C-alpha cells in the first residue's frame, strides 16, 4: 500500500472543520513552547476524541536494538504499555510491527483474524483491541523513525477522515520528534562546547571570531570580549613561516580539514604548543559558513618529550651529560683539534672504594654523596669543559682545545684539592678520593674510543699504584707532569728563599767591537735538584701565573745590577730582559717596569725588553697599547727568537720595535745549511729596510761570526763571546775584556 495524501474533497464539512481545529490546537501548543512529549500526548488525546472508542499510541523505533518502544499512549494502562514494549518488527508483529517491517502504513480492521496480528493475538484479546491502523512517522530526511496508531475497541476500517487524522498525527509527531532531537543535539553541542577539555574557537566565513568556549579562555587567557569579531591571528606566535600557513589553507580548501602542531601566543605573552584541528563547515549549497578550530594543549606532552630528549643525553640522577653526549662533544672537539693543531684530554675518574660507601651508608645516602662530588667537580671546570657521568661511580672529563699538556696539570691539582676536604653525610665525615686516568689527543689516540680506552687503562694504573692518584696513559707524560707539579709547588718557595738569581750573557757590537751590554737569564738553584734551566720551570711558572711575580723580580734585579755596573764605571752598559706573554696579559707590566727603573735609578734607554713573536702576534688591542706605552717609557724593544714564529712583517711594522734577535737555530746550522744562511741574510736585509737592528744569538764559532759580520749583522751573543755567567763573574769578565 502506498501512502497517499487524503484529498480534503473526500471529507465532509464537519470533518474538514474538525481537522482544521485539530491542526490549530496542535499548532498553538507548538508555538506556546509546550514540550515535545506533551504535544505528542495532546495529539493522541485530540485524535481519540475525534475517533470515539479508540486509543492513540506512538512508538519509536530503536535501530540498534531493532525494537519498537511506546513513547506515548496516554489512554493506555501501564500494564498494556509494558506488554507492547520492546516490540520486534516482523510479519506477525501487529500493525505497528508491520509498518516498520514493511515500511508502509498498515490498517488492520480485525486483529483477531488478520495474519498481521498473528504473534500478538493474545494481547489484542487481553486489551480488547479489535482494529489497529498504524502510520509510519518519518523524520525530515524521510526515514521511518516510528509509528502512530489509532486502535479501536471495535472492529472497523478507516474512513478518509480517519486516514486524514492518522496522516496529520504522524506528520506532526514526526516534526515534533525531529525538533526534540534537534533540541537535544543542540543541548549536547552546547554541553560539549562548554565542557570539553579542548579549546574551541568558531569563526564565520570571513574568519571573524564568533565564539570561544570557557576552556579557550582558561588555555590562552583571552575572554570572549577580547576576541569577538577578530580573526584568529591574534594567537599568532610568529614562530611559523608563510609556508606553514600556505599548507594549512591548501589542506582546508582541498579536504575541509587541517591538523598540525602549532605554537600559539597566550594573552600574557607565553608561547603554548598546541595540537590544532580546523574544520570547515559548509551549508547545503557548499558555501562556507564557519571555521571551527579545536586546540589541545600539548605543553605537558612537549615537556615530557623534552625531558625524554634530555634524559637520552643526560644522567637522570646527577643531570650531567651522559657518555653519549660526551662522545658527541668529544668528536666535535676532535675535529676542532685536528684543524687547529691543538690537543685535547679525556679524563676517566673513578671514585675510590665507592662500593664501601654504598654498602655502609645505603644507596640513598650513596646517591647524596655522588651528587656532592658532582658539585665539587663542576666547580673546578671551565665553561668549555664537560663533566659526564658514565656509570655508577665513574665520571669523564673532556678538556678541549689545549695549547699544551701543561694545562692539564692545573685540572689535576684542582681535582685533588677539591676532594681533599671531607664530605659530611648524615653527621659522618667521609674522606673520598678519586683515581684518574688521562689520555691525550693526538698522543694516545685519534678518536673517542681509543682515547677512552687509553684513559681507562691509565685510570686502572692509577688505582693499582694506590688510589687517590692520577696517571697518564703515556709513562713519559706521567714523569713530566709529576715533575712539573712538584716544581710548580716548590717555585713558591724559590722566590721567597732566594733560590732564583740571574746570569748575564754579554752582547758584542760588531761595528765598534765594543761590549754593548748583556741579556739577563734566569737561574733556579734548587736545594736538592741543583740548577734547573729556565726552559723547564718557566712554562710551569707561566701556567700557574707565578711568572708575574718572578718576572717583576727579574726586572728589578736586572735594573739594580746594571745601575750598579754603571756606578762602577761601565756607563754604557745595556741590559736585555725577557718578557713572558703572561706578564702582558695578567701583570701590571707598565707599573712594574716603571718601578724597576725608578728604584734602580737606571735610565730607561739602557733597558731592552725582549718580546716573543707570540706576544706581538696575538693581534690584541691591549697588547698593542701596552707595547706603545712601554715604548713611551723610553725603553728599547726587541723580538726574541725571531724567525721561528712566522711573524707577518706588515703586521710587525705597526709595533715600535728596535731590534730583531735572530734565533739561534738559524745561526747554529748557518754554515752547513744553505736555507739557514738564506734566512739569516733575509732577516738582516729586511731589518735594515725597516730600520731595525739585528743581533744574532747562539754564536759559538769564529766562522759563524765572520759570516754574520760579512752579512752586516749588527750585534752578536753566544758562547763564542761568553756563556751566561753570574753578576760577579760578569764584573770580572768586563774588567778583563779588551775593549
Ligand atoms: P732566550 O731568551 O732565547 O735566551 C737565550 C738562550 O740561549 C739562553 O738559554 C742561553 O743560555 C742560550 N745560549 C746563549 N748562547 C748560546 C750558544 O752559543 N749556544 C747555545 N746552544 N745556547 C746559547 P737559557 O738561559 O736556558 O734560557 C732559555 C730561555 O728561557 C730563554 O731563551 C728565555 O726564553 C727564557 N728565559 C730566561 N730567563 C728568563 C726570564 O727572566 N724571563 C722569561 N720570561 N724568560 C726567560
Ligand atoms: Mg732572550
Ligand atoms: Mg732567544
Image: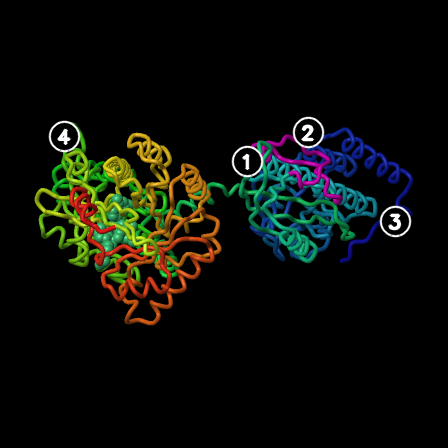
Secondary structure under the numbered disc 2 in the rendered image: helix
Mark 2 or 1, which is nearer the eye? 1
* Disc 4 to disc 1: CB gap under 8 Å: no
Dot 3 or dot 2, earlier in sequence = 3
Q: Is residue 439 visible?
A: no
Instruction: Please state which of the two labelled residues, at mark 3 or mark 2, is closer to the viewer.
Output: 2
C-alpha span from label 3 to label 2: 56 Å
Question: Label 4: which residue?
Answer: 428
* Magenta-tinted stretch: 205-234
What is the C-alpha distance between the residues marked 4 and 1?
Answer: 47 Å
Left or right of 492 on screen, residue 148: right
Say whether disc 4 or disc 3 marks the residue closer to the N-terminus.
3
Answer yes or no: disc 3 within 8 Å of ligand 1: no
Identify the residue under disc 2.
225
Can you give x and y, in whole percent of width and height, for residue 418 in the image? 22, 37
Nearest-to-viewer mark from 4 and 2: 4
Q: CA distance from mark 4 to mark 2?
A: 63 Å
Q: Could you say which quadrant of the image residue 551 lies in?
A: top left
Q: Position of residue 442 (x, y in %)?
A: 28, 61
Q: Which tag, 4 or 1, sits closer to the chain's start?
A: 1
Query: Is-magenta flag for residue 539?
Result: no
Label ID, residue 7: 3
- Give the residue drawn at x 14%, y 31%: 429
Amino acid at each position: 500500500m502506498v501512502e497517499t495524501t487524503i484529498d480534503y474533497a473526500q471529507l465532509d464539512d464537519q470533518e474538514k472543520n474538525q481537522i482544521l481545529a485539530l491542526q490549530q490546537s496542535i499548532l498553538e501548543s507548538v508555538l506556546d513552547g509546550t514540550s515535545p512529549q506533551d504535544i505528542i500526548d495532546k495529539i493522541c488525546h485530540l485524535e481519540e476524541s475525534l475517533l470515539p472508542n479508540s486509543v492513540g499510541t506512538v512508538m519509536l523505533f530503536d535501530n540498534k536494538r531493532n525494537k519498537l518502544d511506546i513513547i506515548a499512549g496516554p489512554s493506555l494502562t501501564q500494564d498494556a504499555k509494558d506488554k507492547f514494549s520492546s516490540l520486534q518488527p516482523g510479519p506477525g508483529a501487529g500493525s505497528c510491527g508491520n509498518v516498520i517491517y514493511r515500511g508502509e502504513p498498515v490498517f488492520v480492521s480485525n486483529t483477531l483474524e488478520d495474519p498481521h496480528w498473528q504473534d500478538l493475538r493474545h494481547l489484542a484479546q487481553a486489551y480488547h483491541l479489535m482494529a489497529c491502523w498504524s502510520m509510519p512517522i518519518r523524520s525530515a530526511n524521510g526515514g521511518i523513525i516510528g509509528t502512530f496508531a489509532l486502535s479501536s475497541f471495535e472492529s472497523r476500517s478507516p474512513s478518509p477522515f480517519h486516514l486524514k487524522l492518522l496522516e496529520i498525527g504522524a506528520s506532526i509527531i514526526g516534526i515534533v520528534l525531529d525538533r526534540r532531537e534537534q533540541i537535544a543535539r543542540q543541548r549536547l553541542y552546547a554541553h560539549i562546547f562548554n565542557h570539553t577539555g579542548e579549546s574551541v574557537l568558531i569563526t564565520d566565513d570571513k574568519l571573524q571570531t564568533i565564539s570561544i568556549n570557557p576552556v579557550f579562555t582558561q588555555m590562552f587567557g583571552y575572554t570572549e570580549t577580547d576576541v569577538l569579531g577578530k580573526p584568529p591571528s591574534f594567537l599568532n606566535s610568529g614562530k611559523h613561516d608563510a609556508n606553514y600557513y600556505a599548507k594549512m589553507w591548501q589542506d582546508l580548501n582541498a579536504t575541509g580539514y587541517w591538523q598540525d602542531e602549532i605554537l600559539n601566543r597566550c594573552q600574557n605573552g607565553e608561547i603554548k604548543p598546541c595540537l590544532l584541528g580546523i574544520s570547515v563547515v559548509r551549508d547545503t549549497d557548499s558555501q562556507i559558513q564557519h571555521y571551527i578550530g579545536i586546540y589541545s594543549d600539548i605543553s605537558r606532552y612537549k615537556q615530557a618529550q623534552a625531558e625524554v630528549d634530555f634524559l637520552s643525553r643526560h644522567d637522570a640522577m646527577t643531570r650531567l651529560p651522559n657518555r653519549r653526549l660526551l662522545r658527541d662533544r668529544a668528536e666535535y672537539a676532535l675535529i676542532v683539534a685536528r684543524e687547529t693543531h691543538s690537543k685535547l684530554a679525556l679524563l676517566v675518574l673513578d671514585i675510590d672504594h665507592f662500593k664501601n660507601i654504598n654498602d655502609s651508608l645505603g644507596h640513598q645516602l650513596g646517591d647524596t654523596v655522588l651528587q656532592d662530588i658532582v658539585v665539587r667537580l663542576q666547580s673546578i671546570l671551565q665553561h668549555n669543559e664537560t663533566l659526564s657521568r658514565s656509570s655508577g661511580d665513574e665520571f669523564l672529563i673532556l678538556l678541549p682545545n689545549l695549547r699544551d699538556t701543561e694545562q692539564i696539570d692545573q685540572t689535576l691539582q684542582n681535582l685533588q684539592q677539591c676532594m681533599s676536604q671531607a664530605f659530611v653525610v648524615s653527621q659522618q665525615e667521609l674522606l673520598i678520593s678519586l683515581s684518574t686516568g688521562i689520555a691525550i689527543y693526538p698522543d694516545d689516540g685519534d678518536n673517542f674510543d681509543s682515547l677512552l680506552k687509553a684513559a681507562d687503562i691509565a685510570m686502572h694504573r692509577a688505582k693499582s699504584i694506590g688510589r687517590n692518584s692520577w696517571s697518564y696513559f703515556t709513562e713519559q707524560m706521567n714523569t713530566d707532569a709529576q715533575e712539573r707539579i712538584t716544581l710548580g709547588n716548590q717555585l713558591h718557595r724559590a722566590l721567597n728563599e732566594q733560590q732564583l738569581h740571574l746570569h748575564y750573557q754579554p752582547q758584542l757590537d760588531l761595528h765598534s767591537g765594543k761590549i754593548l751590554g748583556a741579556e739577563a737569564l734566569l737561574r733556579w738553584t734548587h736545594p736538592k735538584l741543583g740548577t734547573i734551566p729556565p726552559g723547564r720551570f718557566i712554562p710551569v711558572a707561566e701556567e700557574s701565573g707565578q711568572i708575574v711575580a718572578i718576572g717583576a723580580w727579574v726586572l728589578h734585579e736586572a735594573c739594580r745590577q746594571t745601575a750598579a755596573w754603571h756606578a762602577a764605571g761601565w756607563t754604557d752598559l745595556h741590559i736585555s730582559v725577557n718578557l713572558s706573554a703572561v706578564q702582558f696579559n695578567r701583570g701590571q707590566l707598565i707599573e712594574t717596569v716603571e718601578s724597576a727603573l725608578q728604584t734602580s735609578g737606571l735610565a730607561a734607554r739602557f733597558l731592552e725588553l725582549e718580546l716573543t713573536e707570540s706576544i706581538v702576534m696575538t693581534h690584541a688591542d691591549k697588547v698593542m697599547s701596552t707595547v706603545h706605552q712601554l715604548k713611551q717609557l723610553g725603553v728599547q724593544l726587541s723580538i726574541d727568537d725571531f724567525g721561528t714564529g712566522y711573524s707577518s712583517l706588515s703586521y710587525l711594522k705597526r709595533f715600535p720595535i728596535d731590534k730583531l734577535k735572530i734565533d739561534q737555530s738559524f745561526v747554529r746550522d748557518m754554515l752547513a745549511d744553505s736555507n739557514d744562511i738564506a734566512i739569516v741574510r733575509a732577516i738582516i736585509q729586511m731589518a735594515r729596510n725597516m730600520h731595525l737592528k739585528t743581533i744574532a744569538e747562539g754564536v759559538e764559532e769564529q766562522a759563524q761570526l765572520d759570516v754574520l759580520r760579512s752579512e752586516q749583522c749588527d750585534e752578536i751573543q753566544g758562547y763564542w763571546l761568553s756563556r751566561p755567567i753570574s753578576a760577579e763573574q760578569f764584573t770580572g769578565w768586563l774588567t778583563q775584556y779588551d775593549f
